[in-house]
């Protein structure tokens, strides 16, 4: 049962829910600011009851959702504000929804890292918050003895949006068949966006900033601007266009466009991308799940693999991808230490 009552100390109405538990004893919890907040807390309580027994520290009945109730009580005892506790709970339940019903002792670092990496609709700051919340929650559960090990140890904050090189540890790049399945369910404009993103290594935000002035049909190049100049990175970088990408842009250009007109006036939204993935999964007969930003890392990986004798130099890779040396050396280019030792030995050899 859900009802509202007036709190004199707050001078406003708040919500509470009441329902019987074992032996007919009622359980009441109140003080919620909104109806949805009270309903969410009630559902968590029901989930705990559905386990069939009271939680114990042997880890047999504890799920992440049940543990979060106990963690919330711990935070309340530490005088954390309701707004902050509600914000943490909402964030955790949204981005770690797949592990809420999993027994807590079975959760491993690999799962947590994958959910942080694949949180597609959040930015850099929020990814860091996801890591902080996971570390605080699982760290508390480990110290309290509810789980045998802390799965948040070693959890890293990715350095980019969407699929990041860190996710290579948990899953490979999508197969060409999966990408083709998504292209088959997209509209013509959406296929053009995905094609240019794949052939130039551009993520959605970069595609939105491309105007026709940035496209040079004679030199077969496109200039990709950056939202801000990161340390050690270029303000913009020039990417050569493949035959397929060039034909796509010529078709969109038709008889002419204004120089300041965006090449893609409308960008695929997060919700539309989810719909495309679901349609493609039904068509392919198996689950397809990857972020749009994965094309950026696929492009950078392919370009960086062409370094060496007879290929591209490291400055060439930086100019094409717009990556700083720190990013390239950390995720895309591995130094040939055997060759480096031979060169140093040759320089200082007697």
Image (cartoon, grey):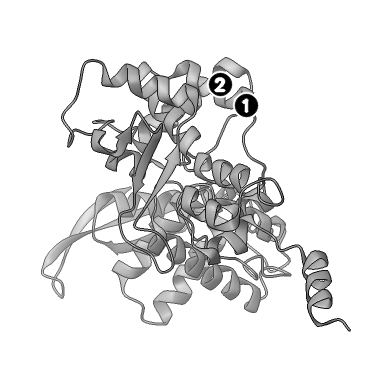
Q: Is residue 216 above or below residue 335?
A: above
**Residue, disc 2:** 180
**Residue, disc 1:** 176
Query: Which quadrant of the rendered structure holds the C terminus?
Result: bottom right
Which quarter of the picture shows residue 214? top left
- Left or right: 301 with respect to 72? right
Disc 1, disc 2: CB below 8 Å? yes
The answer to whether residue 52 is visible is yes
Residue found at the very far left of the displayed protein: 11
Q: Position of residue 68 (x, y in %)?
A: 51, 63
- Left or right: 277 with respect to 149? left
> Is label 2 in a helix, a strand or a loop?
helix
Q: Position of residue 44 (x, y in %)?
A: 47, 53
Kindly report the distance in space between the C-alpha atoms of the residues bearing marks 1 and 2: 6 Å
Residue at figure coordinates x 65%, y 71% from the top left? 153
Residue at figure coordinates x 62%, y 34% from the top left? 174
> Is label 1 in a helix, a strand or a loop?
helix
Name the foreground residue: 77 vs 95. 95
Q: Position of residue 193 (x, y in %)?
A: 38, 29
Callout 2: few (<14), some (14-19), or many (20+) C-alpha neighbours within 10 Å? some
Total label count?
A: 2
- Left or right: 163 with respect to 171? left
Q: Is residue 12 above or below residue 278?
A: below
Residue at figure coordinates x 40%, y 75% from the top left? 76
Which quarter of the picture shows residue 254? top left
Q: Is residue 139 above or below residue 205?
A: below
The answer to whether residue 44 is visible is no
- Left or right: 90 with respect to 31? right
Residue at figure coordinates x 42%, y 31% from the top left? 196
Name the foreground residue: 335 vs 339. 339
Name the foreground residue: 295 vs 117. 295
Callout 1: few (<14), some (14-19), or many (20+) C-alpha neighbours within 10 Å? few
């Amino acid at each position: 049962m859900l009802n509202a009552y007036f709190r004199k100390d707050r001078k406003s109405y708040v919500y509470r829910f009441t329902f019987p538990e074992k032996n007919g004893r009622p359980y009441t919890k109140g003080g919620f600011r909104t109806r949805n907040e009270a309903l969410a807390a009630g559902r968590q309580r029901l989930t705990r009851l559905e386990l069939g027994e009271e939680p114990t520290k042997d880890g047999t009945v504890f799920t992440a959702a049940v543990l979060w109730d106990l963690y919330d009580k711990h935070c309340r005892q530490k005088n954390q504000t309701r707004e902050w506790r509600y914000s943490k709970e909402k964030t955790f339940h949204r981005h770690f929804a797949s592990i809420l019903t999993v027994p807590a002792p079975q959760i491993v670092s690999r799962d947590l890292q994958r959910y942080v990496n694949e949180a597609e609709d959040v930015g850099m700051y929020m990814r860091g918050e996801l890591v902080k919340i996971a570390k605080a929650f699982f760290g508390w559960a480990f110290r309290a003895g509810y789980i045998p090990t802390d799965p948040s140890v070693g959890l890293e904050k990715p350095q980019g949006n969407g699929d990041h090189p860190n996710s290579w540890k948990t899953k490979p790049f999508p197969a060409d068949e999966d990408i083709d399945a998504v292209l088959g369910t997209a509209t013509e404009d959406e296929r053009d966006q995905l094609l240019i993103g794949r052939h130039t290594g551009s993520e959605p935000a970069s595609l939105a900033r491309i105007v026709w002035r940035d496209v040079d049909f004679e030199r077969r190049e496109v200039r990709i601007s950056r939202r801000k100049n990161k340390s050690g990175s270029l303000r913009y970088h020039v990417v050569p266009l493949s035959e397929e990408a060039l034909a796509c842009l010529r078709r969109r250009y038709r008889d002419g466009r204004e120089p300041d007109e965006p090449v893609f006036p409308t960008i695929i939204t997060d919700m539309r991308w989810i719909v495309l993935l679901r349609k493609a999964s039904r068509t392919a007969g198996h689950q397809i799940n990857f972020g749009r930003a994965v094309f950026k890392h696929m492009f950078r990986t392919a370009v960086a693999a062409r370094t060496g004798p007879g290929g591209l130099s490291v400055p060439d890779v930086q100019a094409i991808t717009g990556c700083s040396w720190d990013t390239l050396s950390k995720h895309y280019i591995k130094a040939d230490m055997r060759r480096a030792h031979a060169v140093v030995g040759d320089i200082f050899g007697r």
